[in-house]
Image (cartoon, helix red, strand yellow):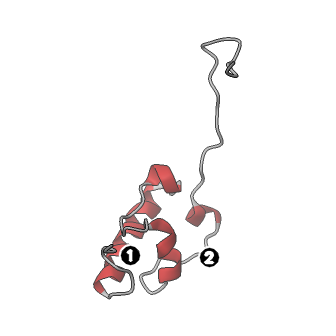
Amino acid sequence: MQNRPSNPRQRTYYKRKTCRFCEDKNIPIDYKSPHILKDFITERGKILPRRITGTCSGHQKKLSLEIKRARIMALVPFTVHD
């Protein structure tokens, strides 16, 4: 038997993800720090979306720009081949 709420209209709420860069202002979003940028890239090389990482829109725009700059400078790979 499955664990269901007694009321079928009852919703389960979850904790909203917060922006890592808004919480700690000392974390730099810069193309020269690929160790930070790699947390926001999949193993295939794609940029993770906001709904997965929890970053705010302003920091997500800056993050994607810096990831693209790091790719051009060859600090972060464009794709990973199998």
> Residue at (43%, 61%) from the top-left corner?
60
Compared across the picture, whether 82 is left or right of 26 comes to: left
State how far apart marks 2 and 1 are (Cα).
16 Å
Q: Position of residue 6 (x, y in %)?
A: 71, 12
Q: The residue under label 1 is which amino acid type?
A: Glu
> What mark, if any, has residue 33 been given in the picture?
none
User: Looking at the rendering, which quadrant does residue 70 occupy?
Assistant: bottom left
Compared across the picture, whether 13 is left or right of 40 comes to: right
Compared across the picture, whether 39 is left or right of 57 comes to: right
User: Looking at the rendering, which quadrant does residue 24 occupy?
Assistant: bottom right
Count numbered badges in the picture: 2
The image shows residue 13, relative to residue 28, as above or below, that is above
> Residue at (59%, 50%) from the top-left corner?
17
The image shows residue 64, relative to residue 54, as above or below, that is below
Give the mark toward the camera: 2 or 1.
1
> What mark, if any, has residue 26 been given in the picture?
2
Q: The residue under label 2 is which amino acid type?
A: Asn
Q: Residues within 10 Å of mark 1 (few under 14, many from 20)?
A: some
Q: Position of residue 32 (x, y in %)?
A: 45, 87
The image shows residue 50, relative to residue 65, as above or below, that is above
Q: Secondary structure at mark 2?
A: loop
The residue at which mark 1 appears reads as: 66
Extreme residue in the top direction = 7
User: Looking at the rendering, which quadrant does residue 44 occupy?
Assistant: bottom left
Foreground pick, 79 / 70: 79
Please report whichever mark, 2 or 1, sits nearer to the chain's N-terminal start: 2
| Labels 2 and 1 touching (C-beta < 8 A) | no
> Which quadrant does the C terminus fall into?
bottom left
> Which quadrant does the N terminus fall into?
top right
Q: Residues within 10 Å of mark 2 (few under 14, many from 20)?
A: few
Foreground pick, 16 / 42: 42
> Residue at (57%, 58%) from the top-left corner?
19
